[in-house]
């Protein structure tokens, strides 16, 4: 280390197959099984790391993830402008579909798309559990 | 940063079109979108003002096929060029793997090109990236202009590329001239920089 700059023009995030398998299992068991329509683990650059859905979603997940990471970054910057470290709840409510954003760690976000059958309280609980488990796996 | 998925053998790389306002970054993406329509499954996303200027970014996902056994997806982004949008411009640059700098060939834009390149260097530095190390291609756009004076290629090279010494193209995003060669060059430079990960 010591240099001000990365030696390479990108950071290397490589998750092994086992880690990805475990993350996908968590997304399915904790969130999709609880009624979430679609869930994405993305990085702050907008790349998709893992994606699971209930089989009935036809979203353009690449655009969704690019916009979600940009939206998160914009809101985060706004928080800093008004003197907050971060806004803890990031949530867009629609008539039929809603989107919930959660920070997993400094690099990753969890995006959950869910409908009317899932309450925000339950979703937040399940998301928090999933994040804890995902962080354990990433740190391995 | 590029994301490599060992399981699905997929690579996602982020390429950002940077440059002064009204230089043709969005037009580059629109040309690519039209040209490769059948290979681009999703819609091009544009977040723009009422005046049709890019407010946040344009986004175009692009499957380029297999490289070294990996399915490569390139995410093309543009930044807003206007000086006042520096906060959003910086956000789009996060995790960038390769940059196309689109310079405006008009004589009266000469200073703005240099300022925008300096701004790219500064914004990359906030992510601890060096403009001398990031895969970079220069595009001198609007070579097709007839009614207004344009800078000779040599002057633009001297202004922008005398230290960087990266590949450069004279181009016209409106007619499509050299848009695809620019794209191919930045993709190959970006993939080359990732080779040690993809072994």
Image: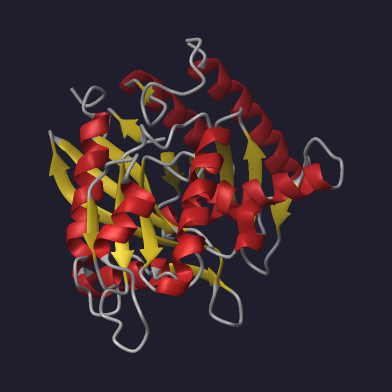
- Position of B152 relative to A12 (above/below): below
- Position of B154 relative to B162 (above/below): below
Residue B169: give x, y in percent of width and height.
Answer: 22, 59
Q: Is residue A97 visible?
A: yes
* Image point (63%, 46%), residue name: A73
Residue B140: give x, y in percent of width and height.
Answer: 31, 63
Q: Is residue A54 left or right of residue A71?
A: left
* Image point (30%, 82%), residue name: B145
Q: Is residue B189 left or right of residue B112?
A: left
Q: How many marks?
A: 0
Q: Is residue B143 left or right of residue A82?
A: left
Depth check, front residue: A92 or B187: B187
Q: Is residue B164 left or right of residue B48?
A: left
- Position of A83 relative to A4 (above/below): below
* Image point (45%, 50%), residue name: A54
- Position of B80 relative to B167 (above/below): below
Residue B183: give x, y in percent of width and height.
Answer: 24, 56
Depth check, front residue: B24 or B141: B141
* Image point (27%, 27%), residue name: B6
């Amino acid at each position: 280390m010591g240099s001000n700059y990365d030696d390479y023009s990108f950071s290397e995030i490589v998750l092994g197959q086992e880690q990805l398998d475990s993350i996908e299992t968590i997304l399915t068991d904790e969130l999709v099984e609880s009624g979430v329509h679609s869930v994405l683990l993305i990085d702050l650059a907008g790349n998709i790391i893992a994606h699971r859905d209930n089989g009935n979603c036809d979203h353009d997940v690449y655009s969704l993830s690019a916009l979600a990471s940009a939206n998160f970054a914009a809101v985060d910057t706004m928080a800093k402008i008004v003197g907050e470290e971060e806004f803890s709840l990031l949530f867009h409510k629609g008539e039929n579909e809603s989107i919930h954003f959660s920070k997993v760690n400094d690099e990753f976000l969890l995006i959950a798309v869910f409908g009317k059958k899932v309450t925000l309280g339950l979703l937040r609980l399940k998301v928090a559990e999933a994040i804890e488990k995902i962080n354990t796996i990433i740190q391995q | 940063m590029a994301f490599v998925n060992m399981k699905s053998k997929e690579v996602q790389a982020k390429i950002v079109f940077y440059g002064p306002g009204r230089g043709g970054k969005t037009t580059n993406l629109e040309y690519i979108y039209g040209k490769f329509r059948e290979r681009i499954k999703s819609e091009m996303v544009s977040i723009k003002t009422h005046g049709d200027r890019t407010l946040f970014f344009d986004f175009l996902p692009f499957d380029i096929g297999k490289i070294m056994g990996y399915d490569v997806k390139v995410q093309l982004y543009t930044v807003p060029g206007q000086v006042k949008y520096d906060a959003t411009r910086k956000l789009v640059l996060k995790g960038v793997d390769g940059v196309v700098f689109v310079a405006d060939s008009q004589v009266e834009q000469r200073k703005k090109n240099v300022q925008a390149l300096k701004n790219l260097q500064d914004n990359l530095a906030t992510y601890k990236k060096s403009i001398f190390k990031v895969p970079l291609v220069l595009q001198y756009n609007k070579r097709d202009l007839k009614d207004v004076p344009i800078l000779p290629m040599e002057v633009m090279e001297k202004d922008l590329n005398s230290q960087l010494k990266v590949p450069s193209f004279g181009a016209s995003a409106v007619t499509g001239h050299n848009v695809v060669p620019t794209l191919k060059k930045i993709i190959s430079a970006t993939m080359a920089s990732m080779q040690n990960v993809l072994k």
